[in-house]
Image (cartoon, helix red, strand yellow):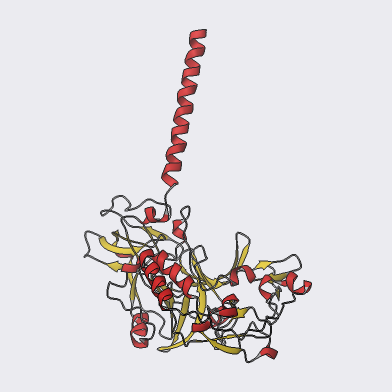
Amino acid sequence: MKRIQKGYRLLALVLAMTLLMGIAAVDGASAKTVAQWMDGFETGAAWFGDDFAYDITDTKACWDLLMKPITVLDVAENTTVALLKEPGGERVNKDKLGGVVAGSTAAVHVLGQDEDGWTLIEAIDDYNRLMQGYVKTKLLKTVTPNNKYGLIIDKLTQRMYIFVDGALYSTLAVSTGVPNDEQPYNETSAGEYLLSSWVGGFDSEGMYCDMAIRFNNGDLIHEVPHNILADGTKRYSTWESQLGQKASHGCIRVQRLSNTDGVNQKWLWDNLKRMTKVLIWDDGGRKLPYPADDTQLFYNPDGGKYYHSTAECSTVKAKYYPLTAFTYGELDTGDFAKLEPCPGCTPVKRKQVIDQENLARGAVTQAELDAQASAADAASTDVVPQSSLAHIEETITPEATAATAAASDADVEITIIRNTDNP
């Protein structure tokens, strides 16, 4: 009996050790950094070619690319096709959401000729990884985009550029995806896509996202999210303040406040058409330059806490128009340095913010930033520019505080909208 009991104990010990080793193996497999997930792969930065200009001012080149037909895979828009190592073989990648292409909306590059019903292509997966593999030749289909509209989303500038009839019509602030070690597929993949369906509103982890338009399977273009409060009002402040920087799970969040052209996500929802082409420019390795020092910015000297890109920002009460101008070169001096970027008109970023983003993208090194800072210190003088900002104590009413954190400025209108929908 004792011998049997010892045997049972030994068996239990072996099973426990095996279980622990299995758990450790799973943990080890998932404990990767974003860089490790991307290791060995080219990114979406290679999609348009090494000599691609990324020049939004070259309207003709942008429009020509927006109108150029693309090849897609002829399956449902919410279906994915796996790339195979060889005709009829294994998948090129088995990571979650890895090595697959969204049907009917995501462009692919054809690399070879038909091989007994299979063709070699390259495409970008949800990790923003450029992959090559085989798909069935019969799935390949050429599509001509809508000839009136086109969209370019630049992950470097976090802006959407809207083209209409060959001309740059307007721009909007966006937030593209920000990956993390647990969800590296949160990156918004670069490439070429087609708008396919007007999905509408949906709830995502407590965020309500309205007017969503599908462009890449689960990735959608939608209005900046909001919370729906107990009294039915909508609060946008948390996610509106993130516009102009990466923040989403892969979707493209778009500003809800109309810009000076009267354009916002509602305008996109009402005007864009199916098969509108969407170009997504990657930011990998690209350096965002500083704005010119004479770039005009605006603020409200009567107690304002934000700096703005326009003299009549829609977040500011009209009685304060026009806002007072100053220059980008003054932004880091005196009391101007205390101003925060407006979450509504998303003005240009401060130099130190641009530096850190360029460093994260690998566009500059820390040594280069240190040398740049040393040169700036050596060139500086002991004279400190005096700001004309008025030192006025801000008074926040309980009503404004309860309404939204973004409306704590005396000049900013409350941005809560009564919810009349029943999602």
The residue lying furthest to the front in this view is: 382
Q: Is residue 119 above or below residue 393?
A: above
Say whether residue 337 is left or right of residue 392. left
The residue nearer to you, when weighing 236 against 98, is 236
The residue nearer to you, when weighing 415 against 99, is 415
The image shows residue 366 at horizontal and vertical percentages of 38, 64
The residue lying furthest to the right in this view is: 398
Question: Where is the C terminus found, in terms of image quarters?
Answer: bottom right
The residue nearer to you, when weighing 155 against 7, is 155
The residue nearer to you, when weighing 378 against 253, is 378
Residue 58 lies in quadrant: bottom left
Numbered circles on residues, count: 0
User: Can residue 311 be seen in the rendering of this structure?
Assistant: no
The image shows residue 21 at horizontal and vertical percentages of 44, 33
Q: Is residue 59 above or below residue 74?
A: below
Q: Residue at (49%, 13%) from the top-left corner?
A: 6
The image shows residue 224 at horizontal and vertical percentages of 58, 72
The image shows residue 282 at horizontal and vertical percentages of 38, 70
Say whether residue 143 is left or right of residue 258. left
User: Can residue 59 be seen in the rendering of this structure?
Assistant: yes
Say whether residue 165 is left or right of residue 45. right
Q: Residue at (52%, 12%) from the top-left corner?
A: 5
